[in-house]
Amino acid sequence: MKPGLNRAQTSVSASITISPINHISGDVGGLLGNFLFQLLGMFYPRRICARANVVVTELITNVMEHAATREGEIGLSLTVDPQELVIKVSNSATLAEFEAIRTRFEEIATAKDPKQLLATTVYARHNDRQKGGLGLMRLAAESKFQLSTQYVQGLLIIRAHLSMEGLV
């Protein structure tokens, strides 16, 4: 690296689409998360790379576990610059699937204290012996991502946004 250059001023954008998802075998979420961790590591501090890895792994894994339409595609896009990190994951979905997910996202987005919501949910799930459903809350509570979702032309799009203020 040349003296005086700040690598964290670099903008990086990447996009990957896989179709159909029923041909995917193995941990594609982990693979993509690790790939982006390594790529971003050339330009950004490890804590930012780790957050990108966690979000990509979680969101891609959610699609692989819960997508009803196995013939559709899965899309991943990442954009990072000195101001923000934005990760979007999309997949084919029905309007009913979107509505169920939107309700969950609204609960997380409107929580006054995401850490308290996570703790309450962990406690409730433990008492009912339920598993799962905590990943999105952890992204908001522990990794400080703002999560949103939208439905466009049969695609469910999940967006994770992180302000880089104080991280770079």
Image (spheres, rainbow, N blue to C red):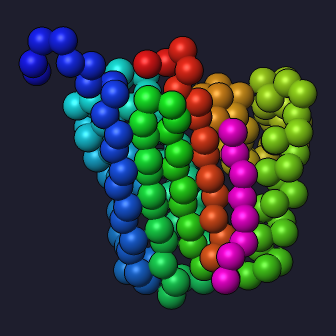
Secondary structure character of the magenta stretch overall: strand
Q: Quadrant of residue 147?
A: top right
Residue extending farthest to the bottom is 71
Of all residues shown, which one is farthest toward the left? Answer: 2
Q: Please give the name of the residue rendered at 38% of the width and 46% of the height, measured from the top-left corner.
A: 33
Compared to residue 25, the image places residue 22 above or below, namely below
Residue 132 makes an appearance in the image? yes
User: Can the viewer see residue 27?
Assistant: no
Where residue 149 appears, as percent x and y from the top left, is 72, 59
Q: Which residue is rendered at x = 85% and y = 31% of the image?
A: 117
The structure residue drawn at horizontal position 42% and vertical position 36%, both measured from the top left corner, is 81
**In the current view of this chain or complex, which residue is farthest to the top?**
4
The quadrant the N terminus occupies is: top left
Image coords of residue 70 (percent x, y): 54, 82
Q: Is residue 90 above or below residue 6?
A: below
| Number of numbered labels in the structure image | 0
With respect to residue 27, does 145 lie above or below?
A: above
Q: Is residue 162 above or below residue 72?
A: above
Q: Is residue 161 left or right of residue 108?
A: left
Magenta-drawn segment: 146-154
Could you tell me residue 39's position as x and y percent?
26, 40
Q: Residue 25: x percent and y percent? A: 36, 69
Drawn side of residue 100 relative to residue 67, left or right? right
Q: Is residue 81 magenta?
A: no
The answer to whether 151 appears left or right of 88 in the picture is right
